[in-house]
Amino acid sequence: MEEEIMYDFTRSSPRENTNAEKYTAKKRLFGTEDVLPVWVADMDIDTPSFVFEDIQKRLIHPILGYEEVPKSAFQAQIDWMKNNHDVEFELDDMIYSHSVVASINVAIEAYTNEGDNIIVQTPVYPPFFQSIKRHNREVLENKLVLEENSKYGFDLEDLKSKINERTKMILLCSPHNPVGRVWKKEELTELLDICIKNNIIVFADEIHSDLVYEGNTHISFSSLSQKAKDICITAIGVGKTFNLAGIAMSSVAISNPKLKEKFLETYKKHHFADGSVLSHVAFQSAYTHGKKWLEELKIHLYKNYEMLKKLCEKYPAKVKLTPIEATYLAWIDCRGMNLNDRELKDFFVKKAKLGLNPGLGFGENGLGFMRLNFAVSLEKMEKIINNLEMALDKFDH
């Protein structure tokens, strides 16, 4: 009988004296070193050991030269997507990219012209705005609706009222960062109908698709129908799932040959090449061996979320935790504290000794919210809870 593997997320390796962005940027972002950084979306959890074992095997060979992405790496990803998300891609659909944001920028340049409108559904991941503006395109903001149950939903009537002849693309965040929604099939199908009717291309950022909690199912936009697949560029990767952001490898799946050709025209101008030898190994290893590790990770992450939820429930007049369906990013409603953006950031930095992402960075409707990354070891999560509890207990405004 195969031995049952158990992974321990109680502690994690220290990152303070490494070149980890989360730590090196503390002084610049928060004005102090005396802060626990819980902002950028990588984990203070050790990358799985099987990835390092496969990298070590590759290092037996003494040459690290140019290498194409092996078909086996993309095939491992294709198999993972089929088995875990019921979406099928072919090897010819897959394109290497060093990041989802890089892929977004290529898509904007490939499928739109200066002055065109690109839809974002706010509050949303800040590089969506930045990428659009840097290419001299216009942001078409379709605000999500905050419903009575504190969950967010699409406002498709608002979207339909804003679309015009210059609306060419939507950047779909699915699952959504920062509000933690897993979009249901019915919601995505309604969005698909609007996009088909108005000839809108869908860039589906599905980088958090593996980090979905029990009771929810990620529906890949491309899996809705052949028509969906024909208008969709899907961005996926191992960076968030297996804490491998540092290998700088993700992928883009494009099934429509015309869309793929147009994407590649722009892509080749910027010489993406094929990434690094060790990135290929890590990428394939994660998709080949990672299922059990991910299952246990999600149990741990949800326990961290529940710790934060329990704390917020002690101070309902001050903070409310948005219900989460996916990601490891908590979206905290702090509007009850009656603080402006600067005061709210100062409260977390100076009183709680925590470095979070201010909600305003995710759009105007993020004002009064803060994003906290709870993908940390149990040991570190207990420190976060303790710091925040003491700060909230003393807060009186």
Image (spheres, grey):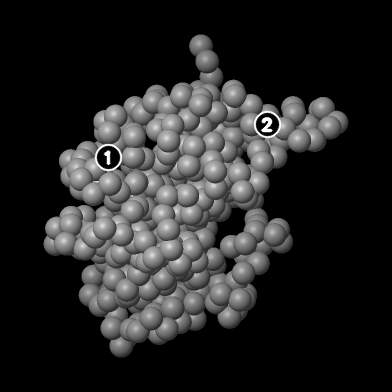
- 157 or 268, which lies in front? 268
Badge 1 is on which residue? Answer: 216
Quadrant of image for the C terminus: bottom left
Q: Residue at x 41, y 77 (%)?
A: 391
Q: Would residue 120 be visible to someone looking at this image?
A: no
The image quarter containing residue 277 is top right
Residue 125, position as x, y percentages in the image? 41, 60
What amino acid is found at the position of numbered circle 1 in the picture? Asn
Which element carries disc 1, helix, strand or loop?
A: loop
Q: Secondary structure at mark 2?
A: loop
Mark carried by residue 40? none
Query: Where does the image place residue 259, in percent across and percent down from the top left?
Result: 42, 39
Lower position in the chain sequence, tag 2 or tag 1 = 2
Left or right, residue 281 beside residue 99:
right
For residue 68, which numbered disc appears in the image? Answer: 2
Q: Residue furthest bottom?
A: 397
- What amino acid is labelled 2 in the image? Glu
Q: Local crowd at mark 2 within 10 Å, few (<14), some, or many (≥20)?
A: few
Give me the residue at 24% from left, 43% from top: 196
* Residue extending furthest toward the top: 1
Q: Judge by depth and name the residue closer to the eye, 7 or 255.
A: 255
Residue 265's x, y, as percent?
54, 43
Foreground of the two, 51 or 63: 63
Distance between the alpha carbons at the discs numbered 2 and 1: 36 Å
Asked whether residue 349 is in view, the answer is yes
